[in-house]
Image: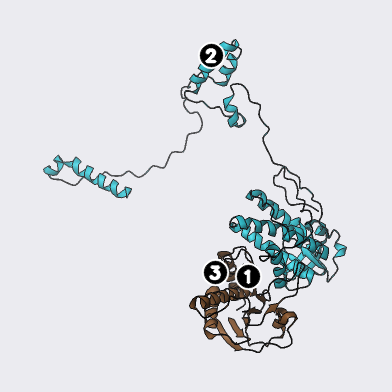
Amino acid sequence: MRGPPPRHPDDQREPIPPVEGLITDAAELVPGARVVYPNQGVCTVVGQEEKDISGHTLQLVRMRREEDGAAVLVPRNKVSAIGLRLVATTGQLQGVFHYLAAQLSDPELDWKIRHRDNADRLIAGGVLGLAEVVKGLHSLSRLRPLPAKEREQYDNARHLLVHEVAVSLAVSPGLAEDYIDYALMPPAGVKFDVPPPPAPVVLPSRPRHRRPAVEEEEGGDLGDLGLGDLGLELELEGAGEQGGEGAASEEAAEGGEAAPKAEESLPVEEPKREPEKPRTGPKPRTPKKAAPVKPKKAPKRSEKAREKPSRKVAHRSTTRRGRKKR
Amino acid sequence: MIRVVTLDELDPADLAFVTRNLYRAFGLGTELAGQKPLPSGLEGKGGRVDALDLLREVAPVRTFADDKVLYLTTAPLSVPPGPLGEPPCWGFAEYGKERATLSTVRLPPRGTSEASVEAYRRRMAREAIHVVGHLWDLHHCVDGRCAMHPSWSPFLPASPEMDLCAFCREKSERKIRLAKT
């Protein structure tokens, strides 16, 4: 069975250990069988059929979701890859209830890892994976309110778990939810004497992409910034002088071996600016000539007005600026 | 429409308080649909009535599509035991369907003082919202202040609120909007 999609394009899709009851052969899907489709819920197999889709003849397994009667069509050759599994057995459910009733484990506090792992558990973790998501997010909600996304994820996981437990125990979903919450949140004074819970679902390892540690060179202060990888050179004002003095003093102490390195790392010469050459390429497009604008005739003013033009203009401009600022 | 049916004698003022708060919580018309007799012969161990049998045997009331019916009783209820024992039963709802029942046995004693009557009514309304919420596909909520938090939870405050949390309210509104009628 394929695991969840890789986190990085360079990663390979990593196979994860199959859960109990995984269906790997489409021949097992006989009409009337009840199976669990990951992230969809319990479905009943209706039959198998052929369909022409965009010129290809596909053999499909038709299923009906029990919750709302929605039709689900799965290509026969992809049955083994999507993680269809049988409804949980009584033994599996006992493990689920023992897990739910177990003492609070430390919830994962890094939301990225938590969200990713929970998504993996919902896809490929089986019924125990659903229980782990419910238990983990429930224990986290005791510490602080769940964010909206995780609240939704919690509700989805609970919905799937309730329906699978209901189908497996042949009870109504309302009763199954009471059983689950009785284990998850027992009333005051009630303690369950249950055996240790089953081992948690094994998730695919997530290699983290880290840059290899760069060996620090003497005097290579800028190596930490990773500017060399970007092809950039940084000139710091004043740093050259201080560095130069410091380097010079160190050179004097060490015998002057480090002098050329310091010169290489901090170039002193300023690049000469070449004189601008006339452009030889194609001429840039000149903007279309605008129609000549006739200068407006200034209105005739009286002599008094001509004597004090600047004050009025200044006054107007300040008031306008003030309005704009407001 | 939410229809409230009593299976025993209950105070009309209490019923009015419950219907008012059901309307406030779900934004649906709520009315008293009369009284029906409690089905006989359902008592099990300790004189408790099996909630599932009660909902199966109780006399139906006239409903239309998407109507929800809440049966109120003073008889103690029980549910079949599960893998870890029998959960305490305040009420029971057919998840996503039509009928729910609520017992007043586990509510705080009604008493005669204003404070005790108020506490009784508030808790009754809270449990009514809880079971009707199950009829609208709401699951139990992690928020102790939400009416959908399990009624027996140790995280429930002493006097729990009668309101749904934002998530449950939005979900119920979505379900009600998508209902056929």
The brown chain is B
Q: Position of residue A4 (x, y in %)?
A: 74, 52
The answer to which image quadrant residue A224 occupies is top right
Query: What's the chain of the residue with tag 3?
Result: B
Question: Which residue matches tag 3?
Answer: B161
SS of the residue at dot 3?
loop
Alpha carbon distance from label 3 to label 1? 12 Å
Question: Which residue matches tag 2?
Answer: A249
Query: What's the chain of the residue with tag 1?
Result: B
How would you rate the neighbour count of disc 2 (Cα within 10 Å): few for under 14, some for 14-19, many for 20 or more?
few
Q: In the image shown, does A206 or A321 lie closer to the viewer?
A: A206
Amino acid type assigned to the residue bearing label 2 in the image = Ser
Q: Earlier in the sequence, mark 3 or mark 1?
A: 1
Alpha carbon distance from label 1 to label 2? 77 Å
Amino acid type assigned to the residue bearing label 1 in the image = Ser
Question: Which residue matches tag 1?
Answer: B151
Residue at x 46%, y 26% (from the top left corner):
A278
